[in-house]
Image: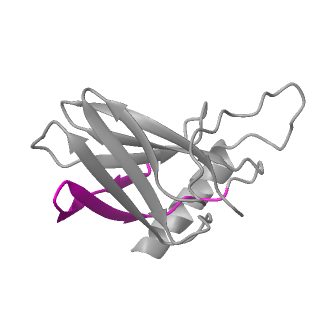
Amino acid sequence: MLVKTMLFMAILCIALCPAPSSAGRKPDPVDCDVHSGPCSASFNNIQVTLDIQPKPVKAMTDLTFTAHFAGEKFVAHPYIDLGMPGMNMGRNRVFLKPAGESLYQGRGVIVRCPSGRRTWKATVTVPGVGSVEFVFHVLY
């Protein structure tokens, strides 16, 4: 199933990613170095720490996403939407399951964009509470 998902996402990316061009384009702001370790951000009195394994984080690889939440408790299971800043990549959602006290994990794939862009974002959402984005580079 994961291989079919990866193939579908790669085809979708080929259809949606712009042709390679850096003329007049500003670099995307990166706020998370996922290759060095976990990244943290907060929203609505909740601190989120996101980690992605294995490192270095590579496209077209089966990845494990781990999110730790500190602060206010919530009932709904969080999830992560993967995409590229400023580009509609279609739905690429990582469903997170409980993996310990305030700890959630899920598996997913970041596809390779033929444009050569390597900047991706992971939007961590807690339904009914809010969300936070982590912007990072992946390796091809």
Relative height, residue 110 to residue 24 (above, below): below
Horizontal side of 64 relative to 55 (left or right) equals left
Indicate the quadrant containing the C terminus: top left, top right, bottom left or bottom right.
Answer: bottom right
Position of residue 19 in the picture relative to residue 86 (left or right): right
Q: Nearer the viewer, residue 60 or 9?
A: 60
Residue extending furthest left?
75
Q: How is the image coloured?
A: one colour
34 displayed left or right of 129: right
The residue under the point 45% across, 36% down is 133
Residue 84 sits in quarter: top right
Quadrant of the rendered structure where residue 107 is? Answer: bottom left
| 131, 55: nearer the viewer | 55
Quadrant containing the N terminus is: bottom left
Residue projecting furthest to the right: 23
Residue at 74% x, 54% y is 114
Residue 74 percent location from the top left of the image: 12, 40
Residue 65 within the segment the image draws in magenta: no
Of residues 44 and 106, the one drawn nearer to the viewer in this rendering: 44
Q: Number of labelled discs? A: 0
- Residue at x-position 39% and y-position 34%: 132
Q: Main secondary structure of the magenta part?
A: strand
Looking at the picture, how far across and down is residue 58, in whole percent? 62, 66
Residue 95 lies, in percent from the top left, at: 29, 56
Q: Position of residue 112 (x, y in %)?
A: 66, 59
Bounds of the magenta segment: 92-112
Relative height, residue 127 to residue 92 (above, below): above
